[in-house]
Image (tube, rainbow, N blue to C red):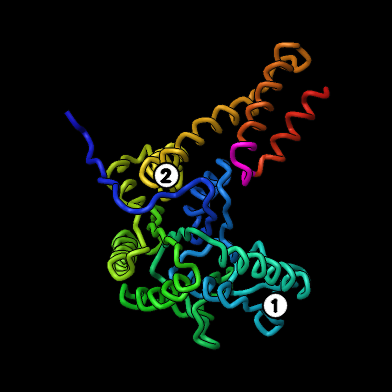
Amino acid sequence: MEFRTKVELPVKGPKLHHSDKLMIWGSCFSEHIGNLLMENKFTCDMNPFGVLYNPLSIATSIQCLLEGTCYEPKDLHHTDDTWYSLMHHSCFSAASQEECLGKINERIRKGHANLLQADWILITWGSSFVYTWKENGAIVGNCHKLPARLFERRMVSAEEIAAAYIPLLQQLHTLRPNLQCLFTVSPIRHLKDGLHGNQLSKANLLLATDKICQELDFCHYFPSYEIMMDELRDYRFYADDMMHPSPLAIQYIWECFSNCCFTPSTLSFLKEWEKIRRGLAHKPFNPETEAYQTFLSQILLKIEELKEKLPYLDVQKEIKSCQALLKK
């Protein structure tokens, strides 16, 4: 007997190779997946503007990186001794204008270079509600807890989202003909919109991804939202706030993502790397024993063999960690 509805995962389409260069945009769910990708030694540039939830702000940030547009003092705001950008997460905010601009522009320069080399773009949309800055009518990425009266809030349509993305992605694909784009809709529920409002918001995102993927053959969709809503619909798969997926749910979605989107060689690497990660995480009662020193030497040898097999692999941190423990 089957007691749950299994989501049918895509079987066709290109797969991610471990050597691919990835760029990741989107909501905090994108950071969960992005962090897992980086833990498994994928080459990732994640959220160059910080966490962004609505698709139009993400499109603006991609356009900015594509053009390499640096920010100027006029693009910043100043409140309570803090300088910030309405397009950026608060991690870019600073006590001085110079520091804030420096952090933003350095990240744009890095993101511009990475975008021009990207093999895959992974985009996670969280909400189709947007906030518009009344002063100039621009859609913002972050309200920085400013008074609500300074903004107008509205829901953008699937047509409006698709109209923003299709020419942008075509432009990117012209520059990077082998580029692939993977969309997903965040399973995080935005309860402040109300349950009905949240469903309407997600529906717009789902319709927009479907339209984009039908229009552009290098764009694809992964059903993380559907997995959470249908396979993991029990509240035990939610965090204490009843909005975010629990660590167990994130791990399950990650496994679905891996099995669906990775090449066989990438899956094989993940198994090897997981053994190494577990070994490095092991905390012995007595690290001075000969047995533990031998254990570390074996891990170091495995890492060096992987590095020789996969020259692009960045494992310097793990090698130094092993070497430091072996010296003790």
Give the Cα distance between marks 2 and 1: 45 Å
Q: Inspect the image, locate mark 2, and give the three-letter code of the amino acid beneath it.
A: Phe
Q: Nearer the viewer, residue 145 or 231?
A: 231
The residue at which mark 1 appears reads as 78
The residue at which mark 2 appears reads as 262
Q: Earlier in the sequence, mark 2 or mark 1?
A: 1
Place of residue 323 in the rendered image (x, y in percent of width and height, measured from the top left): 77, 29
Q: Nearer the viewer, residue 124 or 295?
A: 295
Local crowd at mark 2 within 10 Å, few (<14), some, or many (≥20)?
A: some
In the image, is residue 33 above or below residue 281?
below
Quadrant including the C terminus: top right
Q: Quadrant of residue 304?
A: top right
Q: Secondary structure at mark 2?
A: loop
Residue 249 in sight:
no
Residue appearing at x 45%, y 43% in the figure: 240
Task: Please identify the residue farthest to the left as the structure is shown.
Answer: 1
Residue segment shown in magenta = 307-313
Task: Please identify the residue farthest to the front as the structure is shown.
Answer: 309
